[in-house]
Image (cartoon, rainbow, N blue to C red):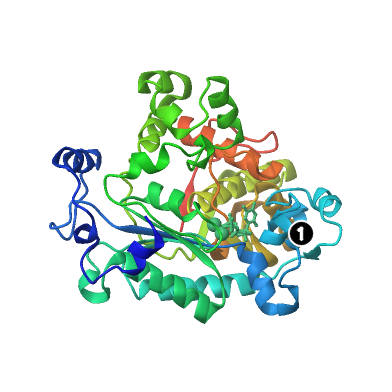
Amino acid sequence: MDEQTISQGSLQPLSQQLPRPSRQQSTQAVRRLPHQPSQRPRAPYRVIAHLDFDAFFAAVEENLDPSLRGKPVIVGGGERGVVATANYVARRYGVHSALPLRTARRLCPHGVFITGNHHLYQEYSHRLMNMLEGYSPLVEQMSLDEAYVDLTGTERLFGSPVRTARLIQRRVQEELNLSISVGLATNKLVAKVASDHQKPAGFTVVFPGQEAEFLAPLPVERLPGVGPALLRQLRDRGVVTVDDLVRVPSHLLRLSFGEWGEMLAHRARGEDPRLVVPRTGVKSISREHTFDEDTGDISILESTLIALTEDVCRRLRHKRLEARTITIKIRYSDFVTHMCSHTLPRPLDVDEILFREVLELFRQGRRRRYHLRLVGVGVSNLVPRAWQDDLFDQELPLLRELDLKLDAIRDKYGKDAIHRGATRPYSWAGSS
Ligand code: TTP
Ligand code: MG
Ligand code: MG
């Protein structure tokens, strides 16, 4: 799809701007798309845009201090001690997200290293989401810097989706002074791969019926969900491109990778039935436990708090959120109840870090000698998390990787399938 075709887009719907595919192609395209309830029955497919800021944290830092432009900028630090992101200048030196900062300093000693400014990133994120909501009620924020927008049927209001997406990209540049890449396709998967196709400032349209053709030549790791571990296994089987993957019979993929293998087979063909679902704002997440018998046993109390925290964090990750404020609740045997909170310098969703915070709050907050009847853990001040992890992507800091692995096991076998050594199972009581 060349630039000219796109910029010449008329006010017609996307479908009418396309050269008519042959009858056979068009039937295939429609058949490949799974049935989705459509608000506008005229369109046989949906038009979905995926937008993702380029080198987001670093670009915001460049706005804050324009003298950084043209220099290698690396944002990262904090508890994780890894690179959150590097601008495109620094990437030329091999610096990338999740790299230990030590390594980044070695690769790019003259780089500008910045710890980061989360409030500001959130503010930019808000501004993008507000802008997107002006174009469609169906906006799904996936992380701080990316979102899907379902533009199906918005032609009458804004013109062709291609033009609308172009306009949004231009407005982001002009109003936020940030570069963003855009992918436009008939489903989320292809739109996401498309937005990543020509970063930075990319604009890639995959027209209906061309999904499989677009994906086929790409390296298989471009498919969301194919991280280094899965990639190794695929490579061992001789799969390098998406096209190679398409040629593997799906029953073999299922045999090797279970349900994920089946999903992978669909993804390789550019099929994705997921709808764009706006998130309803979750304000807080909490769990509490009432003991069968009031207890003062510190090991029981602490391991229960850890189990509660583990559960809260897991729910947080499921909702792709991070929390800044942690609250614990202590109810004594005489029903006197205390709550203690602590607000972190930046939002997090990592079990181990929240354990430490919760135990510290508990040690400070437990002021009476009474036995305890109930303990609870809650998080609030929630924000969309910075990045969009894939379960199979192992280019993650160790703690996060451990969390995701445990989540995956619990999703599959139930919440009690696995616990850390320090926790004890508890029965559920109350949540919000
Ligand atoms: P990404 O969109 O993955 O990366 P990016 O915007 O920096 O670069 P690209 O141009 O390739 O899209 O993540 C968005 C922000 O999330 C990123 O700027 C910093 C943060 N982040 C982390 O803190 N840790 C991580 O491991 C990743 C991948 C991102
Ligand atoms: Mg980005
Ligand atoms: Mg992103």
Name the quarter showing ligand 2: bottom right
| In this view, 334 is above or below 118 | above
Count of labels in the image: 1
Mark 1 crowd level (few <14, some 14–19, many ≥20, 10 Å Cα) = few
Judging depth in this view, the residue of 348 and 151 nearest the camera is 151
- Asked whether 330 or 115 is in front, the reply is 115
Q: Is residue 290 above or below residue 266?
A: below
Q: Amino acid at mark 1?
A: Gly
Residue 340 appears in view: no
Residue at 35%, 76% (x, y): give it: 134
Residue at the location (53% across, 30% down)? 417
Relative depth, front residue between 9 and 61: 9
Quarter of the image where one finds residue 366:
bottom right
Q: Residue furthest front?
A: 4
> Seen in the image, is 69 located left or right of residue 265?
right
Classify residue 152 as left or right of residue 373.
Answer: left
Q: Where is residue 280 drawn, in percent x and y?
A: 39, 63
Looking at the image, is 263 positioned above or below residue 310? Answer: above
Q: Position of residue 94 (x, y in %)?
A: 73, 49
Considering depth in this image, is 208 or 18 the residue closer to the camera? Answer: 18
Quadrant, the N terminus: bottom left
Residue tagged 1:
78
Q: Position of residue 142 (x, y in %)?
A: 47, 57
Mark 1 CB in 8 Å range of ligand 1? no
Residue at 73%, 54% in the rendered image: 83
The reply, left or right, for residue 100 in relation to residue 286 is right
With 157 as the anchor, is 264 left or right in this view?
Answer: right
* Residue 227 percent across, percent down from the top left: 57, 37
Residue 154 visible? The answer is yes
Q: Secondary structure at mark 1?
A: helix
